């Protein structure tokens, strides 16, 4: 495996020639300013994405979408068998909760 960090001498034994076109101070400053602006935008976007209200909003939207997909057909009709199953599960959970309160 060759070491790419060490410059190899040229055949005549002299050091490798440096790049003739190097960036000016103004170009370097412009590059730094552009990088700083990109980083600031990224930090702002991450701040918005990780805000608790935004996370809750996304989760609520996801839950609504999943519920709609589970209870509606692609054409928008209600899937009565699934709605009935969800209603039965809700009644069962409420019944179990009431039963536990009476015993406990």
Image: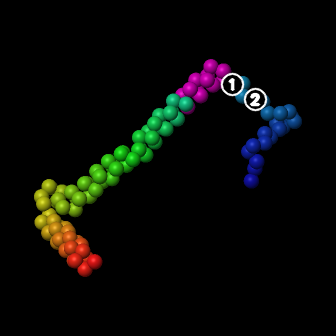
SS under mark 1: loop
Q: Where residue 26 sits in the image (x, y, percent)?
A: 62, 19
Please name the residue that numbered disc 2 is placed on. 18
Q: Where residue 51 sits in the image (x, y, percent)?
A: 41, 44
Q: Which mark is residue 22?
A: 1
Q: Residue at x 83, y 33 (%)?
A: 15
**Between residues 62 and 13, which one lies in front from this camera angle?**
62
- How far is disc 2 from disc 1 in space, using C-alphas? 9 Å
Q: Which mark is residue 100?
A: none
Residue range of the region highlighted in magenta in the rendering:
22-35
| Image quarter (top left, top right, bottom left or bottom right) of the C terminus | bottom left
Q: Where residue 47 sits in the image (x, y, percent)?
A: 45, 41
Q: Residue at x 25, y 54 (%)?
A: 64
Q: Tell me the quarter of the picture where residue 48 sits.
A: top left
Q: Residues within 10 Å of mark 2 (few under 14, many from 20)?
A: few
Do tag 2 and tag 1 residues touch (Cβ < 8 Å)? yes
């Amino acid at each position: 495996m060759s070491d790419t960090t060490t410059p190899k001498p040229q055949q005549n034994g002299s050091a490798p020639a440096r790049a003739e076109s190097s960036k000016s101070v103004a170009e370097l400053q412009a590059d730094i300013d552009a990088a700083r602006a990109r980083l600031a935008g990224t930090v702002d976007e991450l701040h918005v994405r990780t805000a608790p209200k935004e996370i809750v909003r996304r989760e609520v939207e996801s839950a609504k979408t999943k519920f709609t997909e589970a209870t509606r057909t692609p054409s928008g009709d209600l899937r009565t068998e699934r709605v009935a199953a969800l209603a039965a599960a809700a009644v069962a959970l409420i019944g179990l909760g009431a039963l536990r309160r009476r015993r406990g």
